[in-house]
Amino acid sequence: MPEGVIYLDGNSLGPMPVGVPGALEEMLHKEWGAQLIRGWNTAGWMAQPTRVGDMVGRLIGAPAGSVVMGDTLSVKVYQAVAAALKMRPDRGLILSDTGNFPTDLYMVEGLISTLDRGYELRTVEPGAVADAIDETVAVVMLTEVDYRTGRMHDMNAITARAREAGAVMIWDLAHSAGAIPVDIAGSEAEFAVGCTYKYLNGGPGAPAFIYVRPDLADSIEPALSGWLGHRDPFEFKLNYQPGAGIERMRVGTPPVLQMTTLEFAMKAWDGVDMADVRAASVALQERFIEGVGRAVPQLALASPRDSAQRGSQVSFRFENGYAAMQALIHHDVIGDFRAPDIMRFGFTPLYLDAGDVDEAVARIARVMHDRLWDRPEFKTRNRVT
Amino acid sequence: MPEGVIYLDGNSLGPMPVGVPGALEEMLHKEWGAQLIRGWNTAGWMAQPTRVGDMVGRLIGAPAGSVVMGDTLSVKVYQAVAAALKMRPDRGLILSDTGNFPTDLYMVEGLISTLDRGYELRTVEPGAVADAIDETVAVVMLTEVDYRTGRMHDMNAITARAREAGAVMIWDLAHSAGAIPVDIAGSEAEFAVGCTYKYLNGGPGAPAFIYVRPDLADSIEPALSGWLGHRDPFEFKLNYQPGAGIERMRVGTPPVLQMTTLEFAMKAWDGVDMADVRAASVALQERFIEGVGRAVPQLALASPRDSAQRGSQVSFRFENGYAAMQALIHHDVIGDFRAPDIMRFGFTPLYLDAGDVDEAVARIARVMHDRLWDRPEFKTRNRVT
């Protein structure tokens, strides 16, 4: 971590694990450089998406062989929703909530516009989801942890409600994997998707993952039926035949450099119990909420006060939140801003401790009390935060 | 290049440019490591897909701002075909050929199965494509250079025929970009897609590209409507609105490590004229065909003998081609095998010369005359070649 920086944005982009440059250099020289095309076999590149999928799977309660890596989260959302709609041909409604990350909603919009036969995407307030699930709903698609507020859905209760109503359940675990304990198999949800550049520290643009409930994996119909999901990709047949189980959710050639970086980053999780990570995260968050509450009471907590309803982040609302976050970053406390007024701070016990929290609170107090944000350069919006 | 290796498989996976490990190490330390989340702005990651797109665009005759990088070629095929079908709502036929790379056909199969309203994918022999284009055809989708034989389509003639018939033209330039001169804008084709891990040396799993004809780019409807193709992704609106022009063909978070590797690899093309590359490639291919013809006449040329009808590869048919290619690789001449009986050799003048060709011919002659392929270990099929 750069000297002096307190990084409270691991929920957006995790920092670089110390050994990544060495691991990647080795891969470049010994694999791509020396083995060239043979690396697909001899360096194990072809099997990497399922091998790394199993590493991610362990953290979300998915059995071996039920998760595969690849593409982006947006693409994985599309795959899941398209497959889910095929499973409920007599229903036309996709239910989500207004707290979902926009790309999930956008991908459904694109899918139903492409299908062009009257599907509807309905978004309700997060608290109204359970009551909105009825027998007209084909698919319930939710992100477990709200990207703005950190509010958590009750995965088991909502999945059970969807099952009762005969709807297919898709969970986006972008803010869950590596942040909170997840038992996706236990929930009996049909699909889960997520990304690995946040809490899993896979690097900018790291591959996404998709989980399919094992009893369904051999029967789902892939919309994105690419050659690496084919039963026998190197036979080069003219017709698609889906691969066994989760293999059919592979699409094109996997990004081996990103996969290798992620595979290395995943080693940090060997032997880590998500219950321990969760307990440490909650302790940091509580310390932060109490500290900010004492030092800067004018910041309004946007996250649930009850830690059982909160993921691994704490957000505050402040009308000059954009400028305040820029000023904070200038003073080496890195969080981020989410429109319209959310200052967001992520807690990642793998590399943060109580001392970091206390120092962050002190710098936030200084920025707010001395109005250090009230400078033109902090108010100029960049396109990306 | 590893000592002693003659690499005739740059048409499958290009070798690693010498400076890649250093460039990537610098990116890791100075960008991801030091700038963390800020890298999206300060290191220019967010603009990379269009910046690199322009570098690739120059090699295929695409104007600046008409190409964007991302995802895999399979996904880009899907985007192009889905958008093309929207442009011809009254037509139901997608025409391709039996020489197309299978994943292109598979992705169309997945799309039309998802659409489920009677679209037909028809494949004809490569030589029969032009005559098969009529007013019932919505989309013509072809790969310019056949992955097995190297046979080239006449891009301008076929595109003109498609235009006459009112069909939308999609070219897959996987075996063209960096191999042969392409004037995609001059052809007036609506879409082009391609990959960058072959002749462009972007590394295993390097991002794909998509070109949209500039006069259409503001009106096409993206099926994969991800947040980074949104007009204003960081406003986090609940509804999708497509970005300007080619930006709307972006989907999710770009793979920055792969993009950076590709961007570095593309520097090798600064100032390179594709006509010079083509002339050098043809000279190498002619020398190879003549050499093999003299030394090993029993190998049947599968590629067109006329270099004007051939891309940048030369293929031979041999019933024991798999074992022969394994034996050749064992003797450090790396080509590849494509089912059922194709031995394929790619010619890449950026790192091959006449001496390499002569040595390759000599080793091929030895493997064939001494039946060095006739050993059990060369006959065992791996899943990947």
Image (tube, coloured by chain):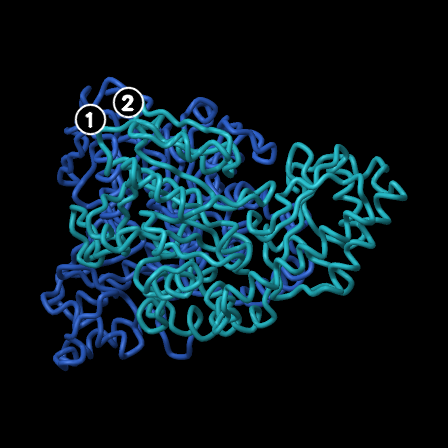
Chain colours: A blue, B cyan
Q: Is residue A162 left or right of residue B295?
A: left
**Farthest residue in the top direction?**
A90
Q: Name the quadrant of the C terminus of chain B.
A: top right
Q: Is residue A300 left or right of residue A335?
A: left
Chain containing mark 2: B
Q: What element carries label 1?
A: loop
Q: Position of residue A275 (x, y in %)?
A: 42, 47
Dot 2: few (<14), some (14–19), or many (≥20) neighbours within 10 Å?
few
The reply to the same-chain question for discs 1 and 2 is no
The location of residue B241, given as percent across then percent down, is 17, 49
Q: Quadrant of residue A360?
A: bottom left
Residue A301 in percent (x, y) is at 16, 58
Taking the spot 47% from the left edge, 38% from the top edge, the residue there is A250
- Are dots 1 and 2 in contact, CB under 8 Å? yes
Q: Tell me if mark 1 has few (under 14), some (14-19) or many (20+) residues whose alpha carbon lies within 10 angstroms of its own.
A: few
In this picture, residue A222 sits left or right of residue B22: left
B72 and B144: which is toward the camera:
B144
Residue found 30% across the figure and 41% down from its top: B163
Residue bearing the label numbered 1: A117
> Which residue in the protein does label 2 denote?
B117
Subunit under mark 1: A
Query: In the image, what residue occupies the spot 26% across and 28% down?
Result: B91
Q: Nearer the viewer, residue A208 or A149?
A: A208
Residue drawn at x 37%, y 37% is B140
The quarter of the picture where residue B325 lies is top right
Indicate whether B56 appears above or below A37: below
Tell which of B246 and A181 is nearer to you: B246
* In-front residue for pair B249/B180: B180
Spatial distance from mark 1 to mark 2, Cα to Cα? 10 Å
The numbered dot on residue A182 is none
Residue A185 seen in this snapshot: no
| Amino acid type of the residue that numbered disc 2 sits on in the rendered structure | Arg
